[in-house]
Structure formats: structure tokens, C-alpha cells
């Protein structure tokens, strides 16, 4: 039986379009921030203390913003839009200055993935111009590290996740594809370490915990799939669970976030939706975004609001 969502603590309003992506930034002693990207091309920087938008950036010529993240600190923002551009923004001292940009050539919805490799360097993975192509570049130089195209026909690349293993050279990359396949790539060797079928439909989003070597993916068939890596970097047989609705989405370790701005919290061992009496994961990203009962979540709605909830212990 579906549980009723708890009442929101507060709601952030003021965006003119539906949200596609969010990113929490809670570093050091600064005020906690939330960056959001909308379908109308606006990037909002929300201050979670006063619950207001400190800044609004119109950075992709009105094209939908697919992904946002921060580099090293909240002073540098990176955004990806449907205009096929990835933009770097200088936010220091109240600025909203475009520092650099690069063209991905991709017209799809695959979000970028970022991995910081040094104090001022990072790797950026994104879908290329060919439907099955993945590109990895080094920032800020924009040097192409490699281009990855699988030998087998797996369809369009749908989602990616860069990560650095605790042992071994790394970095590695997980990619979900249109035919439901999940591939683990070795960036250094430009080779596939493991491949498995995790869904019958396209893999819409995924996340991965490098410490426990466990991940979750979601597909358009309304299913979550839990999977893990063994000590030899082999993907193990996935475990599936139904969810009310999965569309184009982002995911974090304990959550599945769909394009209709719903946040569901799951337990690893059973992939069951937690009840309102179950405490949510702690940390900056623990507030969730949903103000509606779970039974209403299958109806598509695109409110330009962000609702923050708490789950109380009884």
C-alpha cells in the first residue's frame, strides 16, 4: 500500500519552467545552496537559509538545462543544455560570468558526469555526436582524453557515471544504454571491463556508490534495478523493484528523482519505499521534493516549485 508523503517544510517558488535537474552545494561554512536548471533555460542559485534565489543565470539561449554541478567550490558552476553546449561560469564575488564553453554535438538527453582529479583539474564525460559515442575531456584545458564506442549494438547512450576506485589505476565509467544494457568502461585502457542487461527498456538514470560497489538504475518500464560489482569489476545479476513512475531522471544513493519533481527514498536491501516514519538519509541532500501522495505520482505534472520534506521518527 502506498504511503502518503509528509507535509513540506517549505517550497521554493519563482521559476518560470519545470525543473530538469538540481545540485546541492554545502561546502565549508558557507550557506547551503541549491542549484536548479529549468526547461526554459534558467539556472537558479537558491540560498537554503533564507529560501530565496540569490542569482538567476540565463545561460543556454532559452534551451532546456539538462544538468548542473559545481567545480571545487560553489564559485565555479558547470551547466549542460539542450543547445549542445557545456558552460563554465564564474560565480565569485556576485558574478555570473561565462568563462568557457564546449560543444558536445549531442542532441539527446544524456547528462554529463564530472570527476575531480586534482585541485584545479577534472574529467568530464558526455554523450558524443554519434548515438553510441561517449567522450571524456579534461577540464579546464578541454583536452580529449578518449572516445568510447561499444562494439556491440546497444543503442543510444542514456546516462553515465564517472568514478575513481579505491584501488587500481582508474578512473572507471558506468554507462546505461538504450537497449537496457549497463557497461563498465576502463578509461585508461579504453576497454569494457563488464557488461550486463539491467533493464528491458532504456536505462534512464543511474547512480553508484564506490565504497560499497553498489548501484541503482531506473528505466522507462517503471522499474528500479539494484546491482553491484565484485572484486574483479564484474557486474553482478541485478535485483529489480517496481516504482510508481520513472521518466527522464536524476538519481542519488538513496533517492530516485523523476522529471515530474518527485523524490522517492529507498532502502538498499529491499528497494522498498520508506514510510514517513523511517528517517531519511542525513546530509545536505536529504530534503526531498514531493508534496503529493504517492498514489498521485503517476499523473504527470510540471510545477515550477521545489518542495522540501522531512520524515519524522515517532
Image: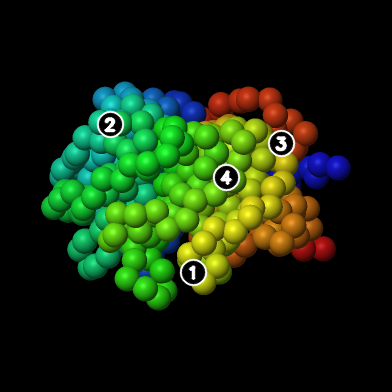
Front residue (pair 131, 88): 131
Task: Answer with left or right where residue 71 lies relative to residue 205.
Answer: left
Mark 4 Cα shell of 10 Å, populated few (<14), some (14-19), many (≥20):
some
Q: Earlier in the sequence, mark 4 or mark 3?
A: 4
Residue 269, visible in the rendered structure: yes
Front residue (pair 237, 52): 237
- Distance from label 3 to label 1 (Cα)? 34 Å
Mark 1: secondary structure: loop
Residue 232 circle label = 1
At a point 38% along the width and 65% down the height, the residue shown is: 164
Q: Which residue is mark 2?
A: 129
Answer with the quarter of the image where residue 60 lies. top left
Q: Earlier in the sequence, mark 4 or mark 2?
A: 2
Q: Earlier in the sequence, mark 3 or mark 1?
A: 1
Q: Earlier in the sequence, mark 1 or mark 4?
A: 4
Residue 244 circle label = 3
- Distance from label 4 to label 2 (Cα)? 24 Å
Quadrant of the drawing holding the C terminus? bottom right
- Distance from label 1 to label 4 (Cα)? 18 Å
Amino acid at each position: 500500500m502506498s504511503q502518503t508523503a509528509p507535509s513540506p517544510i517549505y517550497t521554493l517558488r519563482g521559476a518560470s519552467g519545470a525543473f530538469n535537474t538540481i545540485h546541492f552545494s554545502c561546502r565549508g561554512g558557507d550557506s547551503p545552496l541549491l542549484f536548479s536548471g529549468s526547461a526554459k533555460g534558467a539556472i537558479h542559485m537558491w540560498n537554503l537559509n533564507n529560501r530565496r534565489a540569490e542569482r538567476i543565470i540565463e545561460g543556454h539561449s532559452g534551451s532546456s538545462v539538462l544538468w548542473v554541478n559545481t567545480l571545487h567550490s560553489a564559485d565555479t558552476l558547470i551547466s549542460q543544455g539542450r543547445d549542445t553546449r557545456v558552460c563554465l561560469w564564474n560565480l565569485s564575488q556576485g558574478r555570473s560570468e561565462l568563462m568557457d564553453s564546449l560543444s558536445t554535438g549531442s542532441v539527446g538527453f544524456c547528462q554529463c558526469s564530472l570527476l575531480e582529479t586534482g585541485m584545479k583539474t577534472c574529467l568530464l564525460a558526455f554523450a558524443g555526436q554519434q548515438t553510441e559515442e561517449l567522450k571524456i575531456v579534461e577540464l579546464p584545458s578541454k583536452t580529449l582524453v578518449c572516445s568510447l564506442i561499444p562494439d556491440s549494438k546497444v543503442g543510444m547512450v542514456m546516462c553515465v557515471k564517472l568514478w575513481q576506485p579505491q584501488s587500481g589505476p582508474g578512473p572507471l565509467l558506468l554507462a546505461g544504454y538504450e537497449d537496457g544494457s549497463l557497461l563498465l568502461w576502463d578509461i585508461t585502457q579504453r576497454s569494457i571491463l563488464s557488461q550486463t542487461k539491467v533493464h528491458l527498456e532504456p536505462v534512464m538514470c543511474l547512480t553508484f556508490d564506490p565504497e560499497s560497489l553498489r548501484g541503482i538504475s531506473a528505466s522507462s518500464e517503471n522499474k528500479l534495478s539494484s546491482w553491484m560489482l565484485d572484486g574483479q569489476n564484474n557486474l553482478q545479476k541485478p535485483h529489480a523493484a517496481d516504482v510508481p513512475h520513472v521518466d527522464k531522471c536524476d538519481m542519488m544513493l538513496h533517492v530516485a528523482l523523476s522529471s515530474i519533481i518527485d523524490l522517492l527514498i529507498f532502502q538498499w536491501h529491499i528497494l522498498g519505499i520508506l514510510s514517513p516514519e523511517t528517517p531519511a538519509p542525513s546530509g545536505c541532500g536529504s530534503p526531498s521534493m514531493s508534496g503529493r501522495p504517492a498514489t498521485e505520482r503517476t499523473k504527470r505534472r510540471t510545477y515550477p516549485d521545489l518542495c522540501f520534506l522531512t520524515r519524522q521518527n515517532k
